[in-house]
Amino acid sequence: MNPKLSNRVNEMATSATLAMAAKARELREEGKDIIGLSLGEPDFTVPEFVKEGAIQAIKDDYHTYTPVDGYGDLKKAIITKFKRDNDLTYTPAQIVVSTGAKQSLANLAMVLLNEGDEVLLPAPYWVSYADISKLAGGVPVEIPTTIESDFKVTPKALEAAITPKTKMIIYSSPCNPSGSVYSKEELRALADVLVNYPNIIVVSDEIYEHINFVGEHASMAAFEDMYDRTVVVNGVSKAYAMTGWRIGYIGGPEWIARACNKMQGQITSGANCIAQRATITALENPPSKIRYMVDAFKERRSLILNLLSEIPGFKTNEPEGAFYVFPDISYYFGKTLRGKKIENASDFSLYLLEEATVATVTGEAFGDSNCIRISYAASEAEIKEAMKRIKASLTA
């Protein structure tokens, strides 16, 4: 901690996923052959039809500042997408385009949370939810789940976590890091609890919406009695392999969208012009155009689960979406491997990096100290070699 820096940044945790990726890069620069399974970044290239949209935007000389909340025709494409894919009806005033879904989440925290407001986080949760909440003055409140329940929160657990200070709940479905997908019936059961607490805002992170292996995607906002209290966060980074293009968006109550627009106007203003034009092309095309990537992720899921089943001490469930497995590795706690004592998931993840030269992420960063997150957004060859190395490092 540097006393010349603000308490805000000194008290903020570094993103565990980005920290592991940086450590892996350092080791590669030292000449080590590191397989990176820490980042949630598809190994596919951007679809050709999306590239063509960007190229056309450059030819059409898009280069000036964009509206803070996004181009009008991009908003129209987002509205059409919400209706087509989710049966959700929004107006342009309810849509805000941001520089990635992460900024969308940060905007929401900044405009909705006051000092001491509690934010419910069904655990495991995406690594940045907690610190984004803290940065806005909120207090993260974890709701534990188990691998036996597919890492899904129950209505009873949700009810027990609510206090007079609860202001928001943030969840993702499909979930990062567990890959769990909430069905419409499961979301309805949670909504039946939340309807009794009208001051709680629901933030539904649906960035992995299309990477779903079990069928129809469900959204809390689709329930009439939750629509006016739910903000849907989405973007194009995962399903369209557009991670570096940095386009996210929200659909939600107009009063919240107006506030996000105001906040964003003082932080970044409008998102990149070329990326916005390309996103129009992406969203105007049917999801079937990106099905080849989803099918590949499903095959990789089967591959990695089969290989993990051959490694002693890994306890897994079957993820229903996204591109992560979140195995319980607590079997190794208290054991000494190659002279290194494993006390927790962070020790285990570091051990795999140093001894197996495979980068994963500790589950502690996601609110579950018994697990690690492994991304299978890599190639099949990398997955096979990574699992081979892990097995060898644990059984030698």
Image (spheres, rainbow, N blue to C red):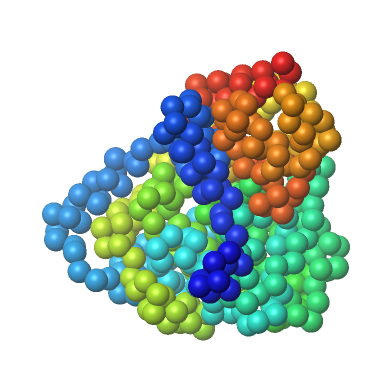
Instruction: Work out which residue is located at the far top of the displayed protein and give it.
Output: 396
Q: Position of residue 187 (x, y in %)?
A: 71, 60
Which residue is depicted at the point 80% across and 73% down? 162
Q: Position of residue 104 (x, y in %)?
A: 48, 67
Q: Is residue 72 visible?
A: no
Which of the 4 quarters of the picture holds residue 78? Answer: bottom left
Task: Estimate the x, y position of residue 303 in percent, counting from the top left.
Answer: 61, 24
Closer-to-camera residue (180/184): 180
Q: In the rendering, at what x and y percent does residue 169 appear?
A: 68, 68
Residue drawn 84% across and 62% down? 157
**Count of labels in the image:** 0
Left or right of residue 233, residue 159 in this image: right
Quadrant that contains the C terminus: top right
Considering only vertical position in the picture, is 40 above or below 153? above
| Quarter location, residue 116 | bottom right
Left or right of 283, for residue 56: left
Image position of 266 with respect to 246: above or below = below
> Is 38 on the left-hand or right-hand side of 267?
right
Q: Residue 276 versus residue 20: which sits nearer the camera? A: 20
> Does residue 118 lie above or below 19 as drawn?
below
Viewer-nearest residue: 251 or 246: 246
Kindly identify the residue that appears in the image at 77 percent across and 34 percent down: 341
Residue farthest along the front direction in this orientation: 3
Q: Is residue 46 at least partly visible in the picture?
A: yes
User: At 39% across and 79% down in the image, what residue appears?
Assistant: 266
In what quadrant of the picture does the N terminus appear?
Answer: bottom right
